[in-house]
Amino acid sequence: MKICVRDAFASHCYRKEYSFVFDNMDLSDFTAGATADTVHTHAVIEASDGNVTCRLTIKADFNAICSRCASKFILPFSVETVKQIKKHDTGEFEDAIYVDAGGCFDIVCEVQSQICFEFPAKPLCSEDCKGLCPVCGCDLNKSSCKCDTRIPDRRLDVLRKLIDNN
């Protein structure tokens, strides 16, 4: 889906708003397998004195899997960013939106980029998630276990033998 901003470059005072709801947008490559049924997007294109910007707000509720305890949970996602819109790529690395020859850009591509950039690499069901027991695999958020999770340092075996002998 393209947004045409050709008129914004020709104007000294320009403002146009767009709202989109994207259903079943394929984001699994960017979100560690998390999915969102709908992605709400609001874009405001503004121009003044030759500078054209896009204020992009993205909101979605992702069905995610916790990286520590492997439980399913809803991850609220919200990001707001402002990017310059440019006619030509200058060759320098810039976080900008570049328009095609017709003065348009693909909003879906920009939404996917921002989700990819802002989505947590390791989503957690809560900040204090205890994860799974490395020995028996029980969810430590729901119950506790009696497993010995200390990993002995083999370099200290000689000292342990000395202590055990005394």
Image: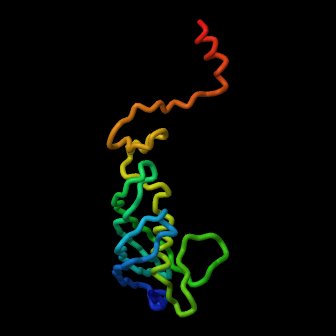
**Is 78 left or right of 102, judged from the image as shown?**
left
The residue furthest top is: 166
The residue furthest bottom is: 102
**Is 112 left or right of 20, judged from the image as shown?**
right
Q: Which one is nearer the viewer's eye here, 70 or 110?
A: 70
The residue furthest front is: 136
Quadrant in which the N terminus appears: bottom left
27 is higher (above) or lower (below) than 20: above
Q: Residue at x 40, y 67 (%)?
A: 80
Q: Which one is nearer the viewer's eye here, 163 or 48?
A: 163
Give residue 58's position: percent from left, percent from top: 38, 71
157 is higher (above) or lower (below) than 81: above
Give residue 161's position: percent from left, percent from top: 63, 15
**Is 94 left or right of 18, judged from the image as shown?**
right
Q: Residue at x 65, y 72 (%)?
A: 92
Q: Which one is nearer the viewer's eye here, 80 or 59?
A: 59
Looking at the rendered structure, the number of numbered marks drawn on it comes to 0
Q: Residue at x 45, y 40 (%)?
A: 136
Give residue 68's position: percent from left, percent from top: 44, 48
How is this picture coloured?
rainbow
Q: Residue at x 40, y 61 (%)?
A: 64
State the image quarter where residue 82 is shown: bottom left
17 is higher (above) or lower (below) than 145: below
Give residue 146's position: percent from left, percent from top: 40, 31
